[in-house]
Amino acid sequence: MNQITIQCRLVATEETRHHLWGLMAEKNTPLINELLRRINDDRDFEEWQSQGKLPVSVVSDLCKSLKTDPLYEGQPSRFYLSTIKLVNYIYKSWLKLQRHRQQKLEGLDRWLSMLKSDIELLKECERSLDILRKKAKEILTDIEATIDKSKTNSQRKRIPTKSSLLFDLYDETEDSLIRCAICYLLKNGSKLPKPDKPEDSKKFAQRRRKVAIKIERLTDQIEGSRPHGRDLTGEEWLLTLITAATTVPKDDREACSWQDTLLTKPKSLPFPIIFETNEDLKWHKNEKGRLCVRFNGLSKHTFEIYCDRRQLHWFQRFLEDQQIKKEGKDSHSSGLFTLRSAQLAWKQDRDRGEPWNANRLVLYCTVDTRFWSAERTEQVRQEKETELLETITKMKDFGELSPTQQAFVQRKRSTLAKLNNPFPRPSHQLYQGKPNIVVGVAMGLDKPATVVIVDRVEGKAIAYRNIKQLLGKNYRLLNRQRQQKQTLSHQRHKAQKRSAENQMGESKLGQHLDRLIAKATVELAKKYQASLIVVPKLEDMREIVQSEVKAKAEVKIPGYEEGQKKYAKQYRINIHNWSYGRLIDNITTQAKKLGIVVKQGKQSVRGSPMEKAENMATLV
């Protein structure tokens, strides 16, 4: 993807803001809340969850039935379309996450059943340790031979790993000795341990406990609450407080649920409005020369654009695209507009006053960076032209077409004709990366980023940059940022003790450092003409760290649960000091502007930061 998101502030009269707040907070958000509630309560929800998706029309049908309700009627049609899109997106994301968690849980359950001590393995196979090791060595030799054969076979795109082959062999065999030998190898990192080094029973017990903790946490997450809406009035929080004060909880789970609700600050802002069509936004300049925008469904209201200078050129391009299409009497295709979609949302500004005055309006715009230059626009135009020609050819193969199908083909032909009339764009030389040069970015708790340039033809690293080299003279800001986070954490802790406001914001220093690291990474990739940047998948890192911290706390302070919680909390303060997702987003954004592809790879847990980055670049 070559899309990035930019934002600006929208300034309008108080009457306009009041009207928009009423639509979004008093009608649109309650409608979304009601749709979420009805879908959660549907008798077929369990079946939908098992399938991993909602039926195509279930949300639109429910929304259609609620349009005439006095509580939700009177909204622009674009708002109803936004509601359907948003609810579908919420459930698509939630169901995907649930499916991912379920797959992880099944894998961990399987691994826990295989993770046995040496004594348990010997008892199961009824053999001595020497025989078990001998069998394990034979299996390992066969596995290594299979991998060597795969490397010489040029037709195979991916070379299997030792662990994947061992798991496959475990599933295929029923022989207890072979199975125990495979478990022996897997728990030792797919290799034979030294014979003179016996297994440490305490470390093994801690290792099993880590896996058990992961399973417990995943189980709680899977059985957790379903998607719910935003309680703008605070009524749900108040009801929970009354229930908790007057009712005895059935079990610990219910008590924890009440506690989570009471400790979570209720959402005070309505759901955003999504504009999927770029022609839903009408751009113009007012008498003062200020860039303004109107929205379909809110055409009587005008919003002035206030943005950073670094993003102003994007909004000026939106106006230019629209003017060119208008002057060309609709001879240009909106499929080549730089703007792809937009979201209208509220953002907290002040704590006092009416909500439409205390909060500010923000417009988030998704733009396609390829449409900035004539050369890359031509690439997209050719891609779209090929797709349209294929669609028209397929329709012709159907033989005689119905009136609806004929109208569809006519629309495609009209779009095809418009694509041959491209927008005037400035010329910009295309970035040409070498396919054999890949950048690997490893991230960790101690060092936020380590970058390695790898030549995959030579099979070796040709350049390396640690976090100090990436930041250069700005490296001192890293320690300052960490000190700030620790200070804020301490202040937040003291505020919690006093039952005072503890939702303390953070400085922009972390974001600034992310931009500096991302800029240095992309400049390094450009210097060596890399065609690809590989960043790690960090979706599992939180769970891994949490499980490790909890297991460490149990070993450090055995049998004292309260002490374990305090130790784990303090340990997390020290290591949770970076927003990896934000850093990856910055690297991706910078790379997209240049035209460098960014992919995600699996980062290993063993080895130095340089080795991890090199492995990611080599194995992607």
Image (cartoon, helix red, strand yellow):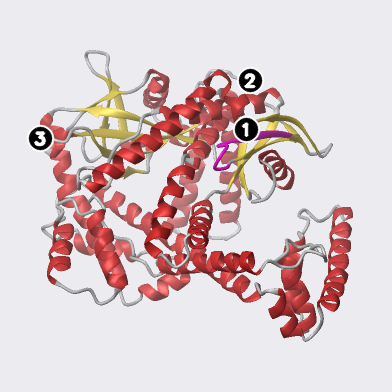
Name the element at disc 3. loop
The span shown in magenta is 444-453
Mark on residue 429? 2
Question: Where does residue 265 sit, x and y in percent of width and height?
Answer: 24, 50
Residue ID at (24%, 53%): 230
Q: Earlier in the sequence, mark 1 or mark 2?
A: 2
Q: Is residue 162 left or right of residue 555?
A: right
Name the element at disc 1. loop
Question: Where does residue 23 sit, x and y in percent of width and height?
Answer: 17, 45
Q: Are marks 3 and 2 in contact (CB under 8 Å)?
A: no
Question: Where does residue 120 sit, x and y in percent of width and height?
Answer: 69, 80
Q: Which residue is mark 3?
A: 353
Q: Is residue 137 left or right of residue 561?
A: right
Front label number (1 vs 2): 1
Q: Is residue 594 above or below residue 341?
A: above
Quadrant position of residue 275: top left
Q: Earlier in the sequence, mark 1 or mark 3?
A: 3
Q: Which amino acid does the dot numbered 2 rest on?
A: Gln
Q: Residues within 10 Å of mark 2 (few under 14, many from 20)?
A: few
Q: Is residue 469 above or below residue 264?
A: above
Q: Which residue is mark 1?
A: 596
Choose between 595 and 486: the one closer to the eye.
486
Q: CA distance from mark 1 to mark 2?
A: 14 Å
Q: Earlier in the sequence, mark 3 or mark 2?
A: 3
Choose between 348 and 206: the one closer to the eye.
206
Name the element at disc 2. loop
Q: Quadrant of the N terminus?
A: top right
